């Protein structure tokens, strides 16, 4: 995953250099048409979670000189699991996995730093993001009296508020590349799981250990978020902590 982000950052550096070169050739923005709308696709989310697993589209609208508002909405789900095992439980299959992502931000384009008008150039502004993931899993329950199966249904909600710094390029007149480069925030995390079988306290502890592995296995940053945290005996985990946002969008200006 670190390699993917490194490659994306190299791409940003290359395109930024290309944009500067284009600007030097073009001279100033006089006579160039300024577009007020952008439709976009969240490329970085798809690269991390998988194409087909993370499909989020957005719309940005310039509403004042050097200011814009954007909203992004789409379906999300976690990738299939690799093997998870405890002394008593092992994942057999993912029965269902889905979710939703909604985020909004308000951008202030830095007129003193940007050669072109919004929505082009460097920007800062606040953001809010909501993610919800639901997942049904089947587990093999290993007992001395014989094996059986346990089904779990989990729901994971994340609310994040923060402040971002980014840069948006407009290449070939209409092709938009939007980079949220720095996005510190504060996240509120709520995880809840239910199971369909009565378990002893010891077996329940084993299952909850497996579920916590499931939660952190394919979700970037959750090892940090849930450090020193455990799902309680009722299958609930609540926590809040500092978070971070990094996004790459590709889009079309009109």
Image: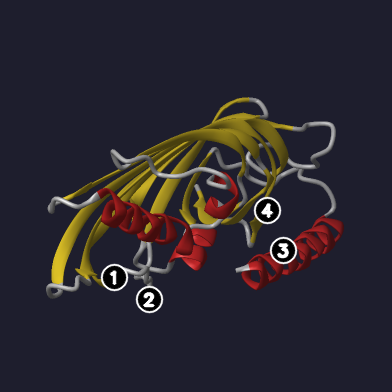
Residue 244: assigned label: none
- Asked where in the image residue 44 lies, by quadrant, the reply is bottom right
Which of the two discs, 2 and 4, labels the residue nearer the N terminus?
Answer: 2
Q: Give the CA distance from mark 3 to mark 4.
A: 14 Å
View extreme (top): residue: 64
List x then y, in percent, for residue 236: 34, 38
Alpha-carbon span between mark 3 and mark 1: 35 Å
Q: Name the residue under label 1.
A: 91
Q: Element type at marker 4?
A: strand
Q: How crowded is mark 2: few (under 14 residues within 10 Å), some or many (20 or more)?
A: few
Q: Nearer the viewer, residue 245 or 215?
A: 215
Could you tell me residue 12's position as x and y percent?
72, 62
Viewer-closest of 92 and 69: 92
Residue carrying label 4: 169
CB under 8 Å between callouts 2 and 1?
yes
The residue at which mark 3 appears reads as 9
Q: Distance between the residues labelled 2 and 4?
A: 41 Å
Check disc 3 and report its element: helix, strand or loop: helix
């Amino acid at each position: 995953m670190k390699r993917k982000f490194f490659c994306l950052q190299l791409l940003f550096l290359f395109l930024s250099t290309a944009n500067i070169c284009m600007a030097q050739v073009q001279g100033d923005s006089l006579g160039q048409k300024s577009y007020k709308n952008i439709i976009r696709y969240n490329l970085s989310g798809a690269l991390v979670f998988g194409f087909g697993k993370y499909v989020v589209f957005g719309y940005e609208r310039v509403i004042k000189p050097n200011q814009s508002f954007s909203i992004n909405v789409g379906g999300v789900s976690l990738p299939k699991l690799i093997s998870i095992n405890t002394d008593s439980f092992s994942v057999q299959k993912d029965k269902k996995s889905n979710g939703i992502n909604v985020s909004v931000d308000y951008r202030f384009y830095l007129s003193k730093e940007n050669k072109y008008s919004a929505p082009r150039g460097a920007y800062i502004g606040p953001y809010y993001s909501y993610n919800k993931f639901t997942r049904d899993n089947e587990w093999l329950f290993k007992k001395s009296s014989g094996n059986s199966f346990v089904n779990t249904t989990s729901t994971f909600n994340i609310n994040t508020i923060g402040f971002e710094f980014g840069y948006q390029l407009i290449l070939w007149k209409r092709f938009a590349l939007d980079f949220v480069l720095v996005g510190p925030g504060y996240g509120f995390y709520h995880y809840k799981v239910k199971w369909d079988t009565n378990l002893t306290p010891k077996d329940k502890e084993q299952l909850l250990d497996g579920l916590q592995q499931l939660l952190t296995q394919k979700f970037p940053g959750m090892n940090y978020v849930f450090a020193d945290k455990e799902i309680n005996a009722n299958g609930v985990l609540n926590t809040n902590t500092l978070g971070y946002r990094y996004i790459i969008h590709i889009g079309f200006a009109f």
